[in-house]
Image (cartoon, grey):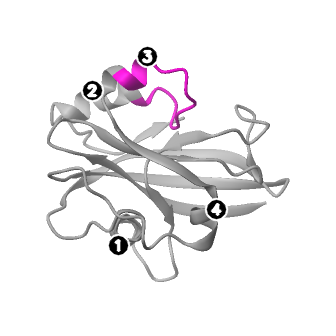
Amino acid sequence: MKTRETARIVLLNEQDRILLFKMKDPSVTSKENPAGEPVWFPPGGGVEENESYLEAAKRELWEETGLADGVNWGPLVWIRDIHLFVHQKETRFIEYYYVARVQGKQISTDHFTEVEKKTYQAHHWWSVDEILNTRELIFPKQLGQKLIPLLKGEYPAEPIAIE
C-alpha cells in the first residue's frame, strides 16, 4: 500500500474562523464518503523530498492561498493517519496539522495545480458554531470540538492523534 505524508494548516483569522476548502474529486473515496461527494477540509498537501513538515505546510499554504507574509506559525498540534482510496487503490495518508494565524480573509487560488482547479468548488472561513451545526461533510472528524482549545491558545505539548 502506498503511503503519502501531507502537511495541513489549521489557518485561523482574527475572528477565530478556520479556512476550509470544498473539493469534489470522485477519484478519492473513503468509507465515510464512498461516492466521492464534496468534502470540506483544511489547506495542505504532499510533503516533497528533503522537505520538513513545516516547510511543506508553508509551501502548500502559499500555493493554495497566496499567503506567506504576515502568517504567524504555531506548533504541530495533530497527526491524522487515514486510509483513502485514490483511483480505487488504497492509500495511507499521514497528515501533520500546524496551527497558523493570519489577519484578514483575502486569499488567492491563482497557484492551484490543474487537479486542484478541476476539483475545487469553494472556500469559506468557518466559525466553530458553523462547523458544529452544518450537515456538510468536514474532515478531520469532530473538527469543531478539536478547534475549541486551539482558539484559546491551548496547544498540546505533543501532537494529538485525531481521526
Which residue is labeled 4 in the image? 118
Q: Residues within 10 Å of mark 3 (few under 14, many from 20)?
A: few
Which residue is labeled 1 in the image? 55
Label number found at residue 8: none
Given the image, on which type of amino acid does mark 2 rest? Ile
As measured in the structure, the alpha-carbon distance from the residue carrying label 2 to the one carrying label 3 is: 15 Å
Q: Is residue 10 magenta?
A: no
Given the image, on which type of amino acid does mark 1 rest? Glu
User: Eyeballing the image, is 137 above or below 79?
Assistant: above
Foreground residue among 42 and 152: 42
As measured in the structure, the alpha-carbon distance from the residue carrying label 1 to the one carrying label 4 is: 26 Å
Given the image, on which type of amino acid does mark 3 rest? Asn
- Nearer mark to the viewer, of 1 and 4: 4
Read off the magenta span: 130-143
Asked if the residue at tag 1 contacts the one at tag 3, i.e. Cβ–Cβ closer than 8 Å, the answer is: no
Which residue is labeled 3 in the image? 133
Left or right relative to 129: residue 1: right
Left or right relative to 45: residue 38: right
As measured in the structure, the alpha-carbon distance from the residue carrying label 3 to the one carrying label 4 is: 28 Å
Q: Choose the circle earlier in sequence order: 4 or 2.
A: 4
Query: What secondary structure is found at the residue carrying circle 1?
Result: helix
Q: Choose the circle earlier in sequence order: 3 or 4.
A: 4
Which residue is labeled 2 in the image? 148
